[in-house]
Image (tube, helix red, strand yellow):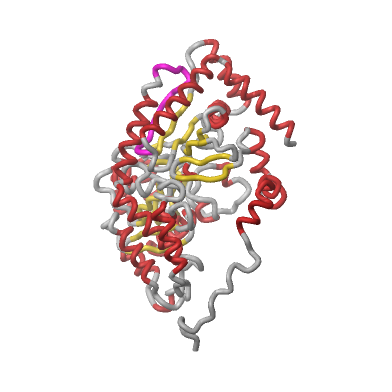
């Protein structure tokens, strides 16, 4: 039997040199994607002029091949909660790799998953147990399965315009038809309007509902649940022996200025909570389904059912180390409170612009999850241009703001959803006041140009030019 002392030394790096490979073939990145991956991604990036080459990143910033600094207001769709390459998370990953742990043996109990579960549950004291998977959609899949099994009922309610993931179960509770089209048949789930308690109760009276899954703030459009809705929905669900599932995949871990977004409303204690994204530290995919003890004990009711729900890479050492490091940083550096303060500052400065710009309809959200909505202007000159864009494609104006923010001001943002005139800001939670002001100054410059009429035609020319060049 070989001991650690007598085991042969590693043979070295062999013939694989990552740095050399990237140096040799990194310039082929767009061609490689076109040939072997989703061919529409590089086509889209070329068309809107987003086909940059980024060389390095740190915190809330990254730099292109020419050394230009870019401000990240997207955070990898919320994954980069602590920004890119946080030194504490980096060190934790180096440490766990250097430890050469006997990971994923499948027939032992490593300490890191238990330690991360303990630390996560400390932020949700009404919950008792955790299942670790690999992504947000997998966390949702677990919650759907657990709710169905625990209640013995087949149907899960979800809210219109919700987004919970793109695997088949999660897609069944996705409120956007554009994602669902062509993938039927899905699970027999039912949409209700966000905030409509009467619609919720009508469905619950049918006595076949296992749960309602809800984002406390919807990612699509950045719509918050109305005040009191989550608490009232929870009471209705429990009265009808159904469960409340809070999808905190994007809103959780400080994004909205509370550790979980549902904590903004007093008395809300979901039966199951889904988290992912920021828990990864931006490095190792991880998802977690948190739940009450009785639910887990019903699912895992005997030794025969010990693997009835599992994941091959779930609770791997690298993901657990990253999660532990993330929570440690958040607690020691006051990340949640910082996100609340910085988000309030950003939202206040943007909201002050609504009286200045006819095209700016609303600024909403909580913490560092902010929606900027555009709408029909009052003046005839702007109304005619707005109508022309709406006739071509709803959501085009918001895209025409996003493009110059990157091309002129080197700020990366996103449109909040297809056919929506909303920009969503979900920057790393570590942005500072100077980053806030940089965004507000850039946004003001773009809106000035939009109201002068130059933005529309410049973007139109860019769109046509890029489309022709990359057919």
Outermost residue toward the left?
A: 267
Task: Specify whether residue 361 is painted magenta.
Answer: yes
Of residues 94 and 137, the one nearer the viewer is: 94
Residue 4, image x and y in percent?
46, 81
Task: Specify whether residue 452 is painted magenta.
Answer: no
Q: Please determine whether, in this image, residue 144 is positioned above or below residue 3.
A: above
Examine the rendering and report whether any part of residue 209 can be seen.
no
Residue 416, image x and y in percent?
50, 36
In the picture, measured across the screen, residue 10 lies left or right of residue 323, that is right
The residue stretch that appears in magenta: 355-368
Q: Residue at x 54, y 32 (%)?
A: 406
Q: Residue at x 64, y 64 (%)?
A: 16
In the picture, measured across the screen, residue 453 lies left or right of residue 301, that is right
Of residues 4 and 251, the one nearer the viewer is: 4
Outermost residue toward the top?
A: 380
Q: Residue at x 50, y 11 (%)?
A: 379
Quadrant that contains the C terminus: top right
Residue 299, image x and y in percent?
39, 68
Outermost residue toward the bottom?
A: 1
Q: Residue at x 40, y 21 (%)?
A: 353
Examine the rendering and report whether any part of residue 367 can be seen.
yes
In the picture, measured across the screen, residue 423 lies left or right of residue 11, that is left
Residue 105, image x and y in percent?
47, 76
Total labels: the figure holds: 0
Q: Please determine whether, in this image, residue 116 is positioned above or below residue 34.
A: below
């Amino acid at each position: 039997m070989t001991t650690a002392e007598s085991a042969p030394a590693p043979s070295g790096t062999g013939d694989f040199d990552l740095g050399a490979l990237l140096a040799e073939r990194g310039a082929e990145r767009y061609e490689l994607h076109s040939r072997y991956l989703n061919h529409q991604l590089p086509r889209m990036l070329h068309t809107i002029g987003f086909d940059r080459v980024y060389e390095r990143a740190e915190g809330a910033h990254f730099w292109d091949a020419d050394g230009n600094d870019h401000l990240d207001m997207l955070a990898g769709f919320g994954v980069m909660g602590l920004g890119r390459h946080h030194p504490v998370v980096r060190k934790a990953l180096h440490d766990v790799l250097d430890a050469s742990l006997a990971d994923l043996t499948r027939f032992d109990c490593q300490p890191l998953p238990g330690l991360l579960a303990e630390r996560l549950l400390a932020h949700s004291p009404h919950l008792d147990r955790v299942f670790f998977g690999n992504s947000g959609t997998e966390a949702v899949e677990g919650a759907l399965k657990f709710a169905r099994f625990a209640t013995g009922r087949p149907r899960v309610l979800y809210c219109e315009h919700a987004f919970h993931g793109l695997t088949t179960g999660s897609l069944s509770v996705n409120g956007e038809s554009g994602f669902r089209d062509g993938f039927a048949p899905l699970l027999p789930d039912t949409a209700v309007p966000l905030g409509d308690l009467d619609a919720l109760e009508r469905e619950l009276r049918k006595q076949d509902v296992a749960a309602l899954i809800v984002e406390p703030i919807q990612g699509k459009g950045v719509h918050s649940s109305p005040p009191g809705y989550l608490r009232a929905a929870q009471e209705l669900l429990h009265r009808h022996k159904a469960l409340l599932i809070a999808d905190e995949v994007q809103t959780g871990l400080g994004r909205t200025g509370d550790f979980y977004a549902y904590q903004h409303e007093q008395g809300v204690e979901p039966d199951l909570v889904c988290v992912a994204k920021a828990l990864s530290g931006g490095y190792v995919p991880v998802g977690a389904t948190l739940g009450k003890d009785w639910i887990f004990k019903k699912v895992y009711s005997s030794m025969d059912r010990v693997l009835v729900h599992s994941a091959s890479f779930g609770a791997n050492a690298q993901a657990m180390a990253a999660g532990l490091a993330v929570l440690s940083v958040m607690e020691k550096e006051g990340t949640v409170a910082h996100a609340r303060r910085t988000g309030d500052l950003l939202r206040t400065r943007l909201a002050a612009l609504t009286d200045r710009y006819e095209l700016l309809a609303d600024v909403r959200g909580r913490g560092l999850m902010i929606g900027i909505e555009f709408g029909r202007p009052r003046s005839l000159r702007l109304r005619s241009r707005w109508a022309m864009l709406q006739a071509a494609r709803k959501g085009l104006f918001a895209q025409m703001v996003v493009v110059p923010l990157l091309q002129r001001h080197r700020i990366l943002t996103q449109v909040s959803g297809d056919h929506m005139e909303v920009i969503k800001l979900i920057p790393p939670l570590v942005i500072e006041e100077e980053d806030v002001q940089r965004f507000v100054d850039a946004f003001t410059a773009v809106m000035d140009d939009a109201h002068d009429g130059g933005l529309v035609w410049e973007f139109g020319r860019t769109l046509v030019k890029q489309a022709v060049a990359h057919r």
